[in-house]
Amino acid sequence: MTIGTHNPVRDTLGRALRLGVVGGGTGSFIGPVHRSAAVLDGRFEVVAGVLSSDAAKCATGGAAIGLEPSRAYVSVADMIAAEAARRDGIDAIAVMTPNDRHFDACRLALLAGLHVVCDKPLTNLPAQARELVRQARERNLVLCVTHNYAGYPMVRQARAMVQSGVIGAVRMVCAEYFQAGMAAPVESGEMTPKLKWKLDHARSGPSLVMGDIGSHAHHLAAFVCGSPVCAVAADIGALMPGRRGDDYALMLWRFANGARGTCSVTQAAAGAENNLTVRVYGETGMLEWQHLMPNYLRHAALGVPPQMLGRGEAYLLPAAQRASRLTRGHPEGFLESFANLYADAAEAMAARIACTVADPLALDFPDGRDGLRGVLFIEAALLSSAAGGAWTDCALE
Amino acid sequence: MTIGTHNPVRDTLGRALRLGVVGGGTGSFIGPVHRSAAVLDGRFEVVAGVLSSDAAKCATGGAAIGLEPSRAYVSVADMIAAEAARRDGIDAIAVMTPNDRHFDACRLALLAGLHVVCDKPLTNLPAQARELVRQARERNLVLCVTHNYAGYPMVRQARAMVQSGVIGAVRMVCAEYFQAGMAAPVESGEMTPKLKWKLDHARSGPSLVMGDIGSHAHHLAAFVCGSPVCAVAADIGALMPGRRGDDYALMLWRFANGARGTCSVTQAAAGAENNLTVRVYGETGMLEWQHLMPNYLRHAALGVPPQMLGRGEAYLLPAAQRASRLTRGHPEGFLESFANLYADAAEAMAARIACTVADPLALDFPDGRDGLRGVLFIEAALLSSAAGGAWTDCALE
Amino acid sequence: MTIGTHNPVRDTLGRALRLGVVGGGTGSFIGPVHRSAAVLDGRFEVVAGVLSSDAAKCATGGAAIGLEPSRAYVSVADMIAAEAARRDGIDAIAVMTPNDRHFDACRLALLAGLHVVCDKPLTNLPAQARELVRQARERNLVLCVTHNYAGYPMVRQARAMVQSGVIGAVRMVCAEYFQAGMAAPVESGEMTPKLKWKLDHARSGPSLVMGDIGSHAHHLAAFVCGSPVCAVAADIGALMPGRRGDDYALMLWRFANGARGTCSVTQAAAGAENNLTVRVYGETGMLEWQHLMPNYLRHAALGVPPQMLGRGEAYLLPAAQRASRLTRGHPEGFLESFANLYADAAEAMAARIACTVADPLALDFPDGRDGLRGVLFIEAALLSSAAGGAWTDCALE
Amino acid sequence: MTIGTHNPVRDTLGRALRLGVVGGGTGSFIGPVHRSAAVLDGRFEVVAGVLSSDAAKCATGGAAIGLEPSRAYVSVADMIAAEAARRDGIDAIAVMTPNDRHFDACRLALLAGLHVVCDKPLTNLPAQARELVRQARERNLVLCVTHNYAGYPMVRQARAMVQSGVIGAVRMVCAEYFQAGMAAPVESGEMTPKLKWKLDHARSGPSLVMGDIGSHAHHLAAFVCGSPVCAVAADIGALMPGRRGDDYALMLWRFANGARGTCSVTQAAAGAENNLTVRVYGETGMLEWQHLMPNYLRHAALGVPPQMLGRGEAYLLPAAQRASRLTRGHPEGFLESFANLYADAAEAMAARIACTVADPLALDFPDGRDGLRGVLFIEAALLSSAAGGAWTDCALE
């Protein structure tokens, strides 16, 4: 069923892609987001899923999201095998499990020739991420990592403006991501299942704060400024006294293009909401995007009044225009940002399936290499902090 | 297919309602919004539609939104007849045509026992609106009018706060709705089909600016302050010199509860986006909601610092909590506001179909009486302006 | 003593003007503002004053503001006579008494050949204001009315931008002034002396809310849009149930240049601070100034991103540049706005004393005619409200 | 002459203090600010000055600020000697010269028993600052350093709220100070005298960016959070390629109370105005102050809506109340922040002169120890940056 037709993407295949979801069952926050995002533009239909390894929960969960009973599976391997046997089997999987299960699910799918959309961080270990990148490349498969903030139209506008030289050479980038979820001593009370796995490093990876939000800030900064972070000096630890594990990371950055930067992330910032911001300063001006006002982008240049660019406006660059569904003054939000990644991934997948050429503007979604860069960055930041803040390399090559 | 499960609505029927859409075909802005909104929570599926009276366009339009070819009809009458003959026929229709066609489509549907969701203004003439209200009441059918701004969670929070006495007795309400679409002499160039029918009073009704946006501001103000407008003094005309028809309405209000107010609307405000705001002043404080920051509600009271309430927060009242899909700090927008009306209408429809009792919090959506109030208000404001701004009654009873 | 030298005004006389103050003694809010504003740029020195008609209080009050004992007088007549007998007698008076005493003080001073700075409203009766305008004109004396909001640099920028056609022909002006001082039933408790005279119509004039703040909003709107209000339709009364006298005025406007407008003022807006705003919409764009962010001016035009102009920037027009003391990013406030009126009035006074030509940019301060327009506007608005909101003429000529 | 009487400071001496100014002559930005600030509350009168070492300029400069010709001196030594011989000689000096001349002027004044107000940074070398602190302590003299941002009422409110435990134990402090003055290659064109001495390290000290603005951010952060910075990890250099000297410093902080922090300062941020902000995160909430909205303080706490506290409100703590001149909703700015330091320093000086006890709330102005901390901080940050960002101690004791 194709509902929305806002997004003028080419419908290469003449049909929606068939998606199998992994994770995101009952009680999940991100599961419904992934699923609504996938179908919003009619480029995917959710036809199969692994919502639990428990047979009963699997059935209930499948029914809750409208799956046919036979296509609610108890394992990724089962789903891949069974779907491969169908004429209308899945084209791709979307992975939204706890972090430690990303690698296996993605690897199995890639090996089976399925395209993949995976939540971030891509994996907990660099070697795993490298392996997924290699598999995707060798098999010519799409591997999209849902750094969804890169899906916001005004983030794409910022990137495109930097690329086109509107602010001149980039000199400084400041990224910040503050949340309040760990400001209270949440460990001492009853914990939700989500909090439980997050606090278990074997599952969530080497750093909770970096995996959860540091990786987002890192991707966003590099995406907007058009150059990867190549070195980091970090102070990582817990603002909450007595906490095991970390809840903050305060960092200095050097970018490949010579720019300097800062990155501050914490989940223990009492009073924060979900405050992700990025500012890029260039020779002649700066751009600022704040997640809590996602439909706007501030551009302040030397000698002229600062401007507030708005989503949906005719003056925006093509990369932002195409990522917009509604006209100016009609707010879009988090769901649409996610949907833009899915729409772009669909465009890329369909082109590979149909052996056609995808719209180049659709290929700017975060991919496996971005995911790998994030995993390497986390590793480097932790090393730096352990070494008293020494500058530590985190470049991909 | 049920995708999203954010909204914990009761699924009374155990299935999605089947919806037939009327209007909203190729090139429409509001069509995709209606359709995406209807399915977002899995309470509706779009299974039939009248997308054009031209057979060829009808087929193309139906295919574009994923309808089975047999369920893309060339007239409302056809759709109603054919669907009535199916075991899986439609439960309801959603009307998103030019204004002059609302009445016939709604009337036919109600006469056929179908529930209705209709865009605003409900009709062009008060007598028509009265007729629809009567039909819906007599047949115990849902008639929802998409004053979608009433679907925003923070608008519902505002209404609930006023109701619960947080700001004391209401004393003054200020509503404003400014757009820029008529700021330039759009009539003198090539006109879009949408603009063409809007500028044709036989189609768009007695006042373009009031039908398009004045009716929204009017509903929003009364919705938030909990009391209808009972009299208006208006100055209506064209800011653009030489324009036939109107593009602004500046008004003073009296509310049934004794409050005073102002309402300013224009589509000729160069520099505006889609700036709808409402402020309610009470004995001890005020509330302000701005459409361009829809996830927030400002509350300023005597003697204490003003507060900015946020969507998704635990401190919100139930009416706002239930209208929220995402957690705090994750922006929602226009689509979700629309989807909330659809979800509530679905709850009411399902309860009537199943002869159960709907969640009382779901029954606060704009209905036929609200639509009628809007039509009466437009009539009264035009009379007032013609009478040199004389106070003119616009109460429903 | 000349302290500040920020403002590059010409020092025509080679000395500061000598000022006698009338009113503003112990406990006054506005007295210290007037005095600090007068001396900020070194264009005036406060050398004499009438701070009380009680001899003892007069002496104490004079000492408190640093007057020589012999120059603290008990009446305006005494001050004028005694100062006229000195070689270093006063050049001008500044009147900051309750409204009913403005007329006599101003008249005596003008008759004695003294320049005048007077607080608003100029007088309580139109005939009085006409008389003062006539006296000042006949004697070639400066009569400045402290509509101090017209002293803010960004208000002057707005006026200059409108004048120079940046937004095209003006079509609509929206002014608003909300305060909270009358939101509570202040009459029922212990009243301050200031509140006592304000609530006494014999002293404060025919309308408290219009005299206090409506006159400011009226002047500001006309000042910025460059055209006087020529007709008003008003609803004036009390939002507070049972209140004698008024606390709100909601109005529609017509301007001489054909623009339409709205003006809403109330002192019973719980939650307001001192919220004066003006917005001017023209053919191609709009300007918005908010008193609570006085160092900025928003300019939004068709088809381009809205801009936020800042005080102290090199791109501002001369009328704004000259009214600025500090560089960009260094906030100025209420005091400086007042000081700008005093500096301009000083420039005009000095030019008349020295028989030279004043800087034309200095002559844009609110004068007696503006004061008279304000008094006429108040009268017309009250008549309109009494006549059920009928459009009522308030033009000067 | 005492003009303003807003600030209810006790007038211990029954007269204004007599001030001699050093620097701030023709063309200076900060000179008029110091002088206007000193006299705003009538606690000082400017009676003597060293405005140039050139006799002719000295006379002109003295005349321009209203000095008697005999009290316009060509050297600090001259001024001190001549004033000491007068019965009405100066009580204090205010130093606003280029940085390298602070030390000599302050030392001479302290040795002569004069109180001192000095611009920041106090000195260019730590040993000099230590010497001044010692001299002031031994002679019981006031040594006030004009970190004027600590004079803003809402900064004082923030400090007092932290002190009184409103946000619980402090965990993280983020300070930022961005300007744009060095964003363009200003060195390559005609340079103003001010820029010339700033770019000369022999005059401006070891780091331009740290002396100019880093020292302000450092003081403000420690002032608000109530604990000194004890260690810094820094990256200092030039964002502008090819620039000699520095224009940015990106830093991580550790505070004596265990809190972590960040400090980012640059004068090469194209698009910035004078953007100083400080945020303090505690156990249960956070406070944010932005210099461009100085009359407000944001307080966001766990589980309740964020609040915006306003200057002049009755709910503020005494430290903020007493620093306010105007009522709520009447903006104050940079001048008043400066004036508050002068008023407090005057209170302290008068108490020492009269051997009385000063209002304890007046004693919170930045003093010599704060100045010394700033100089030590600059030294430590430069060492850290040179050592690859190693954590470097900068505690006073």
Image: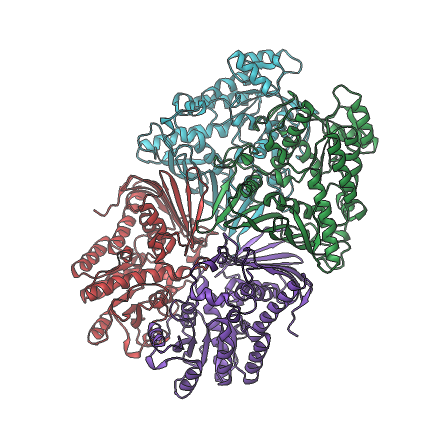
Chain colours: A purple, B red, C cyan, D green
Q: Where is residue A248 in the image (x, y as percent from the top left)?
A: 57, 59
Q: Is residue A267 visible?
A: yes
Q: Is residue C295 left or right of residue B285?
A: right
With respect to residue B11, does C163 lie above or below? Answer: above
Q: Find residue C229 and report its image quarter.
A: top left
User: Which residue in the rendered view is the most extreme toward the left?
Assistant: B138
Q: Find residue A156 and report its image quarter.
A: bottom right
With respect to residue B87, does A391 lie above or below? Answer: above
Quadrant showing the N terminus of chain D: top right
How many numbered marks does the figure carry?
0
Q: Is residue C247 left or right of residue B15?
A: right
Q: Which of A7 and A64 is in front in this view?
A: A64
Q: Where is residue D164 in the image (x, y as percent from the top left)?
A: 53, 41
Q: Is residue C349 left or right of residue C211?
A: right
Q: Find residue A39 and report its image quarter.
A: bottom left
With respect to residue C129, does D242 lie above or below? Answer: below
